[in-house]
Amino acid sequence: MASSRDETVPLLATARDSILSRPASTCPARNLNFDEAEKLAAESVVKHPENGRLFPLTTPMSDLGTLGTGVGLYFNFVQYASIALALMCVFTLPVMISNFAGSFAFNPDEQIGFPRNIIVASSLGNRPPNQPLLLHSIMDFLCTLAFFGFLIYYRRAQLKAQRAIETRVVTAADYSIRVTNLPADVTEEEISDHFAHFGDIAKMDGLDQVTVCYRGYAERARLLDLREKAEEDLEQFSVQMQSPITFPDAREGHAAASKVLDRAAAELHALERRRGKEWVSCGTAFVTFKLESSARLCLQQHLRPSLLQSIFTPRSQHTPARLFRGTLPLKVSQAPQPSDIIWDNMEVTPHSRALRLAGTSCVALLLLLIATGLIAAVNGKHFFIGNEGVLLASLLNVVAVLIIIVSNVSMFVLIPVLSAFEAHTTKGQMELHIMLRLWLFQVLNTMIAAFMFWDASRNKEGQTNWGHWFADGGFLIINVIFGDATLMNAIEFFRPFDVIIPRRQQAPYCMTQKRLNRVYAAPQLSLGMRYQMILKHLTLALALGSAMPLVYWLITLLCGVTYWIDKWNVLRLYKKPAKSNGDVGKVAAVYIAPLSLLLHLCLAPYFYTVVVSCPTELSCTPNPLLTPTFILLGVAAAIVVVLWHPTLYREPEGVEWEQVREREVPYSCIHGIEQYRPQHPWADTQYVGARTTDSPIGNRNQSHSTTRPVERPSRGGKSTDDDGEIGICVF
């Protein structure tokens, strides 16, 4: 490990060094080691597996295989989206020049001031009506082909990068399966015997790598966390009691923490006694084979045919998998990465999880309706207060932008809480739900708010038209994109809530090194939060790009800035993220991006129609002058629909994957490979309360041949401290 400060302290830049600089300590305990706290935070950042140094910022993301597939695919997505949007900026440059040739935006009678007149001048609203838009149609057609072409290219590159990462980096998931629909009284020996005919089960320290999820784990994990927090508080108050004048409430706090610690220890004691009498499975287990080929064979045997395959395939060709205990069909799937599993949620039933999902969706919908209602109230002259006393359009716009940004920020706080309540079994699933909800909420919130400003302002004659909508609704969208992106990237770069404020406000009052280390802990990357911001602005750019080409330029700049901020944070600040698969990236590339492109092809004819045929109305009959436009956009839509599935779903063929997988390296020979062990297994040997009681409860890990299954001693989820940085042993 390098000892130089710039390689160990995860400070982002000179501009932030003064903000993140160590605060002057005002606590009476002068023996705290701030350097140690900073060093521990720095050591959690990803390092090069060979020399232990930080990765250079120029390192290609495809070379960071130890971060998992999901992180690399996110950076590829942002990079290729920037390239595609940059090309679309080039295509729309003649369109913007053509729009600037109009005279509507700078007409004094229209009463459109700066800077709104610049936005109107670059949009369709500056063009006179009843004129063909052949140039716009051709450029729009080329933009559609360019974006879809880059999307296809990215998807090919994404799949190849995924294969490259998964080829070079061997993980526990390559050897493991997830088994569900198990009976409540299942034992590990039964599972091992059932799957042994596919190949040898992997062993570590003489124990089969079979992990059964038991009921009561979530409660035990909660009690252990409560006990740890109480012990930390007890230590903190013990130090404070040495200065009773400075901390007069320390004694009461110490007594309260002692009670919490005793109660947690007693509940853990009782829970362990109940578990010792009856071990009930959640119906889920993880099985790790010695060889990867055994896991692949097991997955193939348990692959369920689709409905059409089951109808048209003769029954004689079906090879059903063995039934568990001769009667129970098991569901077998590829296991997620061990660090991606949320063990606390394993005992939540699918029915309960579905009910939670429905409830949280209703809450998110309610918040959307509230935000929409507030914006309607702001622009309420047609909804509530009639035509008298209309507020200035600029004031309406500012208030509406604030409402949108506040509602978006509130969703940033609420959605992760709701997603945690839904009890997803993997972090990847939770990130996916966070991404989808935030993306959909913010797009709908922004678009609905913008179209409410259809007639927020008028000219001297009291008339409004689409030119005024671009001055109001279009200006609102530009403000939301710029303000939201600036705010979120600034928060992501400076990390005020989990880095700056805790280190400056809480660190000076820490009494123990453990509490100080917790305050200085490195933040974590949330792929769902970062994906949603890129996808939201990408969707807004495609939806409005035909009418407002300026948004292409803004979103291109946003993607470039976001890429480098996130890359800096991943390589310099963030805790090494949990390994996740590419599900979030797949949804973004295969579903959301093409749907956004189809939204563009639906809104483009609408904008062309109303601007050319009826600039003072919200809808009207298309003008015959737009026939070439409709033909070009129809051809583009047909291309997207026809090529969507074969180009974005089908994986590229290659032999390197199979050649590498034919090496058949045993699981136990992979250096640093993870194991399927929860963070708090049923293996603690004692539960200590505030009064220090020794209790050998929970020491069930000695027997592997008992009639009831037991979980073996934890190795922290990993076999070494390398956290899955893979190196293959030499025979």
Image (cartoon, helix red, strand yellow):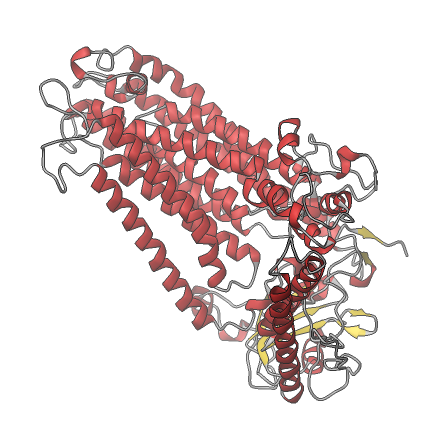
Give left or right: position of 435 versus 133: right
The answer, for residue 476, to whether it is visible in the render is yes
Residue at horizontal 26 percent and vertical 44 percent from the top: 374
Residue 301 in view here: no
- Measured from the top left, where is residue 172 in percent x and y? 71, 60
- Looking at the picture, tell me which residue is in the foreground, 159 or 311: 159
The x and y percentages for residue 690 are 70, 73
Task: Name the quadrant of the C terminus.
Answer: bottom right
Left or right of 538, for residue 426: right
Percent across and percent down for residue 555 are 45, 29
Quarter of the image that includes the N terminus? top right
Give x and y (percent) for residue 285: 63, 73
Image point 65% across, 55% down: which residue?
Answer: 245
Seen at 80% across and 62% down, the residue is 666
Q: Is residue 698 above or below residue 723?
A: below
Q: Tell which residue pokes out farthest to the right in this image.
A: 731
In this rendered view, identify the residue nearer to me: 682 or 248.
248
Can you tell which quarter of the image residue 571 is in? top right
